[in-house]
Image (spheres, rainbow, N blue to C red):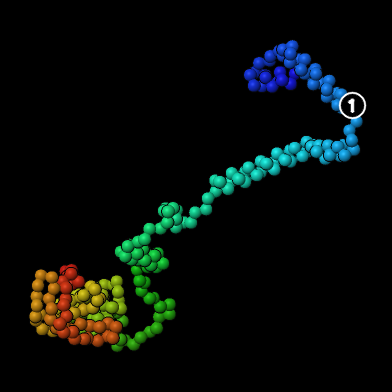
Amino acid sequence: MTQSLLRYWSTGQFTTPSTQELKVQDTLSSLTAVLDLLPMPPRLDKQASSLHLTETDIFSCSSTQTTTVQIATLRLTEVTVQPSLGVCPLGPISLSKDQSYQQAMVEAAWQHMPHPSDSERIRQYIPRNLCPTPVYHHQLPSPHCDSVDFYQRLSTETLFFIFYYLEGTKAQYLAAKALKKQSWRFHTKYMMWFQRHEEPKTITDEFEQGTYIYFDYEKWGQRKKEGFTFEYRYLEDRDLQ
């Protein structure tokens, strides 16, 4: 009957066992009954009882095997890769000098990211408690203090102070415009103002060379530089209107 069930599960149809198969089954059944009637020695009895498996042992063994298979599957599927090797599993490629410089600049820019408050306009100070001033002091700003004519009457050092310390304001723009009217030229590489001390000795389409007077904002004073080469590519030549 067991073989019939196995055949049913494998083929989906019941089949009738043959006469020879029935004889073999009857012989095996009779042999099993005879062996059960025979007495078993004590040692073999203990060994057989120790080898006897219960349903709990079978299920626990199967669950342990399943867990082992799952762990082995996880070990095969999970791979730990360093983030730096995620794009290039064979190892990082050595960067050129320019690429290393660009990477350093990107990291520096990331560490010094602009803050939203950097784009806000500078707010004028409004005192909470107004202090009365004598009448002979100016109560209102001069009506022409925001014109180029007013800035041209200021000293050169005052114009430099306004340019370097009032950055991003209209006063800086007017100070730069007044300095250009006094034949000062701004060098975008050194961030300094230069003025010809005499006519350049060499003039080409790309540069001019001679003696210049420049304003050193670090030491706060005018200095003289002989044999200086002023490249036109560093000349700030925008027309300030």
Crowding near the residue tagged with mark 1, few <14, some 14–19, many ≥20 C-alpha atoms within 10 Å: few
Is residue 138 toward the left or the right of residue 155 in the image? right
Residue beneath the point at 43% across and 80% down? 129
> Does 41 sit above or below residue 102?
above
**Residue 190 visible to an observer of this rendering:** yes
Q: Nearer the viewer, residue 65 or 184?
A: 65
Residue occupying the point 75% across, 18% down: 1
**Front in this rendered view, residue 227 or 143:** 227
Tell me residue 41's x, y (percent).
89, 35
Quarter of the C terminus within the rendering: bottom left
Quarter of the image where one finds residue 109: bottom left
Q: Quadrant of residue 236?
A: bottom left
Q: Is residue 110 above or below residue 6?
A: below
Which three-letter amino acid code belongs to the residue tagged 1? Leu
Q: Position of residue 161 (x, y in %)?
A: 27, 81
- Residue at 55% across / 48% down in the picture? 78
Q: Position of residue 90 (x, y in %)?
A: 42, 53
Secondary structure of the residue carrying tag 1 is helix
Name the spot of residue 178 as percent of width and height, x first. Answer: 18, 77
Which residue sits at x=24%, y=73%?
189
Residue beneath label 1, please?
37
